[in-house]
Amino acid sequence: MLDTFFFYAFALLTVAGAALAVTMRSAVHCAVWLIASLLGTAGLFLMQQAEFLFAAQIVLYVGGIMVLFLFVIMLVNLEAAARERQMRKRWPIALAGVLLLAAGLARSLEEGIRLPAPRPAPEAAAGNVQQIATVLFGEYLLPFEVASVLLLVAIVGAIVMAQREDAR
Amino acid sequence: MHPVTLYHYVALSAILLVIGVFGVLTRRNLVVILMSIEIILNAVNINLVTFSRHYQHVTGQVFAIFIIAVAVAEAAVGLGILIALFRNQETVQADEVNLLKW
């Protein structure tokens, strides 16, 4: 009962935040609503016993990515952009496509999700973080290392691109 | 009230995906387009965590971590491009950037 209540509360926060984030006029308002949406998602992770992702979502998404977004919004002058038209000229076509996508998703959800039954839960003595570490540093060690290279490339790329031409 | 099932989470994720796609396709402001992409990635993460719970196996959560890493890289590079674009073109509207248009 309490579970159901919290699910709907977090789901409402997530969906309403996302909907306002894509429709607000000012980019700062969009960013703040997106933060609300990401916090709602973090709550949903917690409800599904994904404690590590709950922490990672708040620290990385809300604390990292969104601060980066807000920095750029402050750096780039968006006041002129906020006064202009917010939607593309041919947005009704895009809306039709989105509605088609929504209809397709609703149709496939209506048919129901047929999944093989879950295996009997292993005697999970280890906590969530320990389980993730076992899989991440065992089976997925190579992708993990590749991800670190990807982040290094992204850092260097962002510096090169944001650098002034005359500073080189 | 019905108990919350896997179905509820998948439906929520589908709604988020639709909202994100709508934002990417219709908004002109490049910053908001990048934020819509984050919404789409979040929808994927909700699905991964849901099925990870359903199968009682954490591989889905490990993939969600990789998605977060890719989202960080994408946001850093995307915002770097945005700053370079604003410096050269004085605009952040997606449809005013037509340097490559024939």
Image (tube, coloured by chain):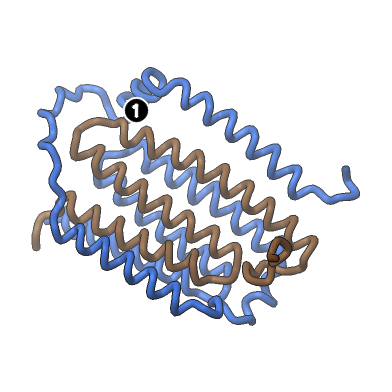
Chain colours: A blue, B brown
Spot the residue most to the top: A138
Seen in the picture, residue A109 relative to A60 is either above or below; the reply is below
Residue at image position (65%, 56%) is A71
Q: Identify which amino acid the numbered label 1 is placed on.
A: Ile
In this view, A128 is above or below A57: above
Q: Which residue is labeled 1 in the image?
A: A132
Chain letter behind tag 1: A
Quarter in which the C terminus of chain B is drawn: bottom right
The one of B99 and A64 positioned closer to us in this rendering: B99
* Quarter residue A11 falls in: bottom left
- Residue A78 image offset from top left, x and y in percent: 67, 70
Q: Which residue lies furthest to the front in this view?
A: B102
Q: Quadrant of the N terminus of chain B?
A: bottom left
Residue B53 on image: x %, y %: 22, 39
Pick the residue in front: B100 or A99. Answer: B100
Mark 1 neighbour density, 10 Å: few (under 14) some (14–19) many (20 or more):
many
Tell me what residue is drawn at x 40 percent, y 54 percent: A39
Q: Is residue B70 visible?
A: yes
Q: Is residue B21 positioned above or below A50 on the image?
A: below
> Where residue A133 appears, x then y in whole percent?
37, 24
Q: Is residue A10 visible?
A: no
In the picture, measured across the screen, residue A19 lies left or right of residue A46, that is: right
- In terms of image quadrants, where is residue B39? bottom left
Where in the figure is residue A96, as x and y percent of width and height? 38, 75
For the residue pair B20 and A96, the one nearer the viewer reads as A96
Q: Which residue is drawn at 69% across and 44% down?
A: A158
